Image: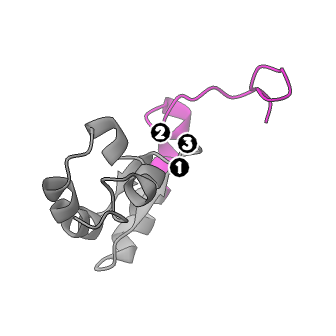
């Protein structure tokens, strides 16, 4: 919203590897582990999958192997659902 309003965002996109976000990363990892055996993903504001648990890896492995989608699109939740080569395709 800051960028849309013409302002510089107060917090840059440093990713979850930033030193001051280690506690957030630990909490997300814990939540995803507790979600097993059900799939769980963490997405960012651009709908890119940032973290996933093992159940999610197993579930989506077949998708990643069977569809011919560009790698940068295959990790975006919106593209996976709405892309012509994604889940909605009839192939």
Find disc 2 in the rendering and name its residue.
16
> According to the image, label 1 marks what residue?
24
Residue 5 in the image: above or below residue 38: above
Mark 3 vs mark 2: give the one in front: 3
Label 3 vs 1, first from the N-terminus: 1
Q: Which of marks 3 and 1 is in front?
A: 3
Q: Residue 87: name its quadrant.
A: bottom left
Quadrant assignment for the N terminus: top right
Say what secondary structure mark 2 lies in.
Answer: loop
Q: Which residue is drawn at 42% across and 50% down?
A: 79
> Residue 42: image x %, image y %?
46, 56
* Residue depicted at 77% across the width and 19% down the height: 8
Mark 3 surroundings within 10 Å by alpha-carbon count, few (fewer than 14), some (14 through 19), many (20 or more): few
Is residue 21 visible in the rendered structure shown here? yes
In the displayed structure, would residue 34 be above or below residue 3? below
Q: Give neighbour class at mark 2: few <14, some 14-19, many 20+ (Cα, 10 Å).
A: some
Segment colored magenta: 1-27
Q: Nearer the viewer, residue 59 or 54?
A: 59
Q: Mark 3 points at which residue?
A: 46
56 sits left or right of 17 in the view: left
Q: Look at the image and tell me whether residue 26 can be seen.
A: no
* Residue 83: image location, x then y, percent: 40, 52
Q: Upstream in the sequence, badge 3 or badge 2?
A: 2
Q: Residue at x 86, y 27 (%)?
A: 5
Marks 3 and 1 close (CB-CB < 8 Å): no
Q: Nearer the viewer, residue 70 or 53?
A: 70
Say which quadrant the C terminus sits in: bottom left
Q: Do the residues labelled 2 and 1 touch (CB within 8 Å)?
A: yes
Magenta segment main secondary structure: loop
Disc 2 from disc 1: Cα separation:
8 Å
Residue 16, given in percent of the width and then of the height, sits at: 47, 39
- Indicate the secondary structure of the residue bearing disc 1: helix
């Amino acid at each position: 919203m800051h960028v849309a309003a013409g302002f510089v965002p107060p917090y840059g996109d440093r990713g979850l590897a930033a030193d001051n976000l280690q506690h957030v990363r630990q909490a997300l990892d814990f939540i995803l582990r507790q979600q097993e055996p059900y799939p769980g993903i963490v997405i960012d504001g651009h709908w890119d999958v940032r973290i996933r648990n093992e159940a999610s890896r197993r579930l989506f492995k077949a998708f990643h192997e069977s569809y011919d989608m560009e790698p940068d699109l295959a990790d975006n939740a919106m593209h996976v659902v709405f892309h012509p080569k994604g889940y909605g395709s009839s192939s």
